[in-house]
Image (tube, grey):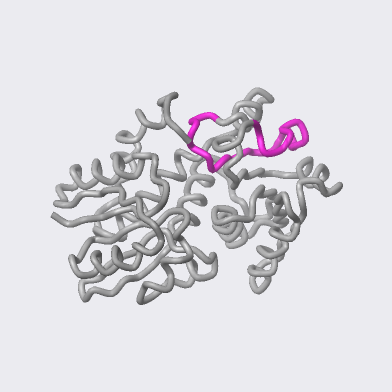
Amino acid sequence: MRTVALFGNPLRRLHSVVMHNAAFAAFDIDARYELRELQEPELAAQVRQARKEQWLGFQITAPYKQAIMSLLDEVEPTARRIGAVNSVEITEDGRLIGFNTDVIGFMTAVRNWAHTDLTGARVVVAGSGGVGHAATYGLAEAGVERLTVLDLDAADARRLATEFSAFTQIEPMSFEDPRTGDRLGEADLFVNATSVGMLTPGPVVDVARISPEAAVFDVVYVPSQTELVRQARARGMRAAGGADMLVAQAAAAFVRWTGKEDPTTVMRQAVNPLLHRADLTP
């Protein structure tokens, strides 16, 4: 039996385990997906084990998405530009290739849900961390007209803008910037790429400040309906949580490891009961 594991700390959720093991069973693949919570000094030994035992691959979550990069043979350009690896393929000759499924997961979810061409759209993204990098990168590639990134500290948003300056123009600002209200009021799409709504209560911005014509996408999937999504829907706005992004990320990695067809339907059916549980810890 081949192994796939998720490395991180802490690891509290079983969503990835449930999705991948359901897909392995459905496609008759002799493999298992498991969680391996570890400290950073243990990471290198786990990577060596994965190579030696010829795993299908492995995944990485916080806080090791950057630390893993120096332990790999290759990091694909998109992951290098984003500055984070969350998935690794182990080739037949034992090479470890790092890639990132955040961009494809985010863009697949947004496009499938919004049913709209993002070219020329005015977009506001809250958060300049790892998911914010991925969302911003994907939106820039999609050809949005104006891309504003908000953060508690404008310096963090400016760093993201500088990192991506070679291929796109990003307007960085803090949540308290007087221009924020104008950008929210003009937005075609608002994206929450922070943990607000999961680790802290409430919406990340005042929903009443967002254009009522805007679509709202929250990357958070626990709880299944965040306060941001609830308030946006109450105003009659189109709003979605991060469940579709979660599944799309998993499906992209599965296809990469196995060469099989898209397992989205199987994965979604398997994870749905977890997504709708009210007792899950964030």
Magenta-colored span: 202-225
Residue 80, image x and y in percent?
A: 50, 70
Residue 262, image x and y in percent?
A: 31, 50
Quarter of the image where one finds residue 275:
top left
In the image, residue 94 sits, relative to residue 29, either above or below, namely below
Residue 93, image x and y in percent?
A: 21, 76
Residue 117, image x and y in percent?
A: 59, 50
Q: Residue at x 65, y 23 (%)?
A: 234
In the image, residue 151 sits, relative to residue 278, either above or below, namely below
Is the stretch drawn in magenta largely helix, strand or loop?
loop
Q: Residue at x 46, y 45 (%)?
A: 245
Quarter of the image where one finds residue 155:
bottom right
Q: Residue 69 in magenta?
A: no
As drawn, is 14 to the left or to the right of 78? left
As drawn, is 76 to the left or to the right of 262? right
Foreground of the two, 84 or 42: 42
Foreground of the two, 136 or 40: 40
